[in-house]
């Protein structure tokens, strides 16, 4: 049994607590929050199975705790994660990992030195549909990736600790990093506006990787909620629409063929579009957050790296920092 303490029971913390509680191999021993009303709410759900405190050091001082889960604002991640590591406990932390690459690298070095694990909840990597897309790409079902178009938009929640790009595009960047096996970008450009907020509430991020290009749109000020990923391959095309109630993943046997030879009417070649069947793969329903937590548990139990550890988080945050530096330039 793995004992875990949770710091933060605000916006996202209740979801983390629920999935920790559902795992039969995990005991949610502590919940910490500075707001008494939140602790009272937690106590109504978990009754006597969990201890409650407004002082996070109660968790750090508990020698039975194996992992501390941090569900706080991004600016607090570095300080709390560092204290958790120094108390000889593994770290689960929400995205973005930290506020800067410098902070992320310091935590990575500290965890390695202390032989502890850091699991960053890049939740979309554990989504069953993303896992299916990964298998389609790895099996060459869609051919070479030509481009990826991602849209993640809604009205609110406008945050003042990070921009819409750091809040929303981080999901798509981790998906792309996972699908492309950590491929590094060659060129980055970005554009955005900070409507109603000190940080950008709307952004457009363009990235040229080694073998494909991507476009990521993030917005907190859209009238429609969109969660869509389009992947165009040299053989087939994929559309993942996470807002649909069913048939979220569709594989299109569509493409473009280049025809050459003596019968071609144009100078050297002709381009012909190809239409084919639409395939809707069966996807077993799974909870991505539960999968993420279970991946963390197994990585600690078996002393192996998690899929979404500091290395991936640092690659993603490098892109975000470069995009910030190039914003509107």
Image (tube, grey):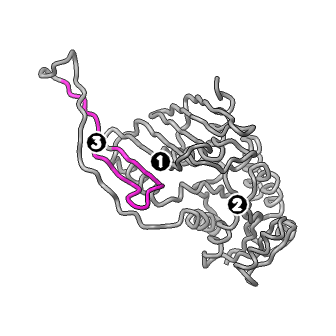
Please name the residue that numbered disc 2 is placed on. 11
- Tell me the CA gap for discs 3 and 2: 41 Å
- Marks 1, 3: nearer the viewer: 1
Q: Where is the N terminus found, in terms of image quarters?
A: bottom right
Asked whether residue 281 is drawn in magenta, I would say: no
Which residue appears farthest toward the front when viewing the image? Answer: 223
Q: Residue furthest left?
A: 263
Residue 228's mark? 1
Q: Position of residue 125 (x, y in %)?
A: 53, 55
Q: Position of residue 14 (x, y in %)?
A: 68, 67
**Residue 132 drawn at (x, y percent):** 42, 57
Per the picture, the main secondary structure of the magenta-coloured stretch is: strand
Q: Position of residue 143 (x, y in %)?
A: 34, 42
Q: Residue at x 79, y 75 (%)?
A: 40
Read off the magenta span. Answer: 237-260
Q: Residues within 10 Å of mark 2 (few under 14, many from 20)?
A: few
**Within the image, what quadrant is residue 102 found in?**
top right
State how far apart marks 1 and 3 are (Cα). 19 Å
Is 251 one of the magenta-colored residues? yes
Residue at 38% from the left image edge and 58% from the top image edge:
247
Q: Which residue is mark 3?
A: 254
The mark closer to the camera, 3 or 2, is 2
What kind of element bears circle 3? loop
Above or below: residue 232 compared with residue 34: above
User: What separation in Å lies between label 1 and label 2 (alpha carbons)?
Assistant: 23 Å
Residue at x 49% of width, y 36% of height: 214
Using the image as rendered, state which of residue 7 and residue 199 is in the foreground: 199
| Residue 312 seen in this snapshot | no
Could you tell which of marks 1 and 3 lies nearer the N-terminus? Answer: 1
**Residue at the farthest bottom position:** 48
């Amino acid at each position: 049994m793995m004992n875990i303490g949770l710091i933060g029971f605000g916006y996202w913390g209740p979801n983390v607590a629920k999935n920790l509680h559902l795992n039969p191999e995990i005991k949610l021993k502590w919940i910490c929050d500075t707001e008494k009303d939140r602790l009272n709410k937690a106590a109504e759900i978990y009754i006597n199975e969990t201890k409650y405190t407004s002082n996070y050091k109660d968790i750090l001082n508990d020698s039975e705790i194996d992992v501390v889960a941090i569900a706080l604002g991004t600016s607090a991640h570095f300080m709390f994660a560092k204290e958790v590591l120094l108390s000889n406990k593994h770290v689960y932390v929400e995205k973005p990992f930290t506020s800067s690459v410098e902070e992320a690298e310091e935590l990575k070095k500290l965890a390695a030195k202390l032989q502890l694990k850091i699991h960053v909840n890049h939740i979309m990597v554990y989504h069953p549909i993303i896992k299916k897309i990964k298998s389609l790409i790895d099996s060459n079902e869609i051919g070479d990736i030509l481009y990826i178009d991602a849209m993640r938009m809604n009205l609110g929640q406008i945050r003042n600790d990070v921009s819409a790009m750091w809040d929303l595009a981080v999901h798509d960047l981790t998906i792309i990093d996972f699908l492309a096996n950590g491929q590094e970008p060659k060129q980055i450009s970005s554009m955005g506006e900070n409507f109603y907020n000190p940080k950008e509430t709307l952004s457009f991020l363009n990235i040229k990787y080694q073998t494909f290009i991507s476009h990521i749109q993030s917005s907190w000020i859209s009238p429609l909620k969109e969660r869509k990923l389009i992947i165009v391959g040299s053989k087939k095309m994929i559309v993942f629409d996470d807002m649909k109630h069913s048939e979220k993943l569709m594989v299109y046997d569509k493409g473009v063929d280049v025809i050459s030879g003596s019968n071609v009417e144009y100078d050297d070649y002709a381009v012909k579009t190809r239409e084919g069947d639409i395939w809707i793969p069966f996807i077993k329903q799974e909870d991505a957050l539960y999968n993420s937590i279970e991946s963390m548990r197994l990585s600690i139990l078996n002393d192996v790296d998690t899929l979404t550890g500091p290395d991936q988080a640092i690659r993603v945050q490098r892109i975000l920092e470069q995009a910030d530096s190039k914003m509107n330039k």
